[in-house]
Amino acid sequence: MGIRLSVLDTSPVVQGSTPREALRHTAELAELAEDLGYHRYWVPEHHGMRGVASSSPAVLVAHLAALTSRLRVGSGGVLLPNHPPLVVAEQFGTLAALHPGRIDLGIGRAPGGAPHVVRTLRRTDRPYREQLVELQGLLDPADTVAVPVRGGNVPRLWLLGSSPGTAALAAELGVPFAFARHLSPDQTCAADLVSVSVIAAEDDERAEWLAGPIRTKVRSRAEGNRIPLPSPQDAAAHPNPDDGRVVVGGPETIRRRLQAVLDETGTHELMITSPIYHHADRRRSYELVAAVASWLTPAGAAEP
């Protein structure tokens, strides 16, 4: 089995842009990803974050699935404690009925926003495992009150996380696990899918220039200040060292570092998120990653 490449897109609202522009770029990128042979395309749930336009995964998934024909499209993920499980099952059952065999339902448990924002969501304090088991039952087409699910309109359920504990819960429930390595690069978990932050360019020097904005944003977040992704020019005025969170480089560097992730995690699927300021540079990054995919091998396999 070869390596699958997929996309995680937060619909970034970069400095000087608007949510409308960000969502239009997401639609364009999904079409490009399908043309390049990416396997799936996920969008997250965030609330009250001015640098992220993706706040309603079900709505955005519906749009992206209608724009594409082969690409699997899904949530990365729906934050289950923010929603009644029945509503989630009905929404994604409807999507699965409209786009058979193409819908993923990735589930997470993070708040998705600052405490004062999350309070407006009426988030439940029920045990997470209990919510997951209820959702699994609602996605059983043989015995569900979620009418759209009946007849086999079932999305592919995934559990998302960045810790061994969540990986163990996924195994217990028999659900594939997606490891958010882009959030916890120092953690290592066996996973069916691993997400990685990647900034690829024609050469290492250009990639380092493009990486300046995300390094500035990460530093600002650590200082308690959430900012939109700045331009490379603004980021260059306050350079930050490489903290290893993002895979940065030209094609050969990217190939080598992604192969290291495959060897470390044992996964057969890498989900790429590329926090790049200019949309044209972000598109090019995904093109370059797709171009090196044939040179990547699963852990333990022979080099091509």
Image: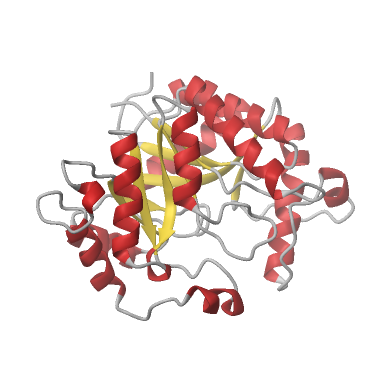
Q: Residue visible at 32% across and 67% down?
A: 165
Q: Residue at the location (31% across, 72% down)?
A: 128
Quadrant of residue 115 in the image?
bottom right
On screen, residue 230 versus residue 26, left or right, reads right
Quick check: 199 above or below 173? above
Give the farthest residue toward the left: 142
The location of residue 246, given as percent across then percent down, is: 60, 47
Q: Please, which colouring scheme is shown?
A: secondary structure
Residue 241 in view, yes or no: no
Image quadrant occupied by the N terminus:
top left
- Name the side, left or right, on which 221 lies relative to 150: right
Decide if residue 136 is in sight here. Answer: yes
Residue closest to the eye, 142 or 255: 142
Out of 17 and 177, give the one closest to the viewer.
Answer: 17
Expressed as whole percent of the image width and height from the top left, the position of residue 253 reads 60, 32
In the image, 9: left or right of 300?
Answer: right
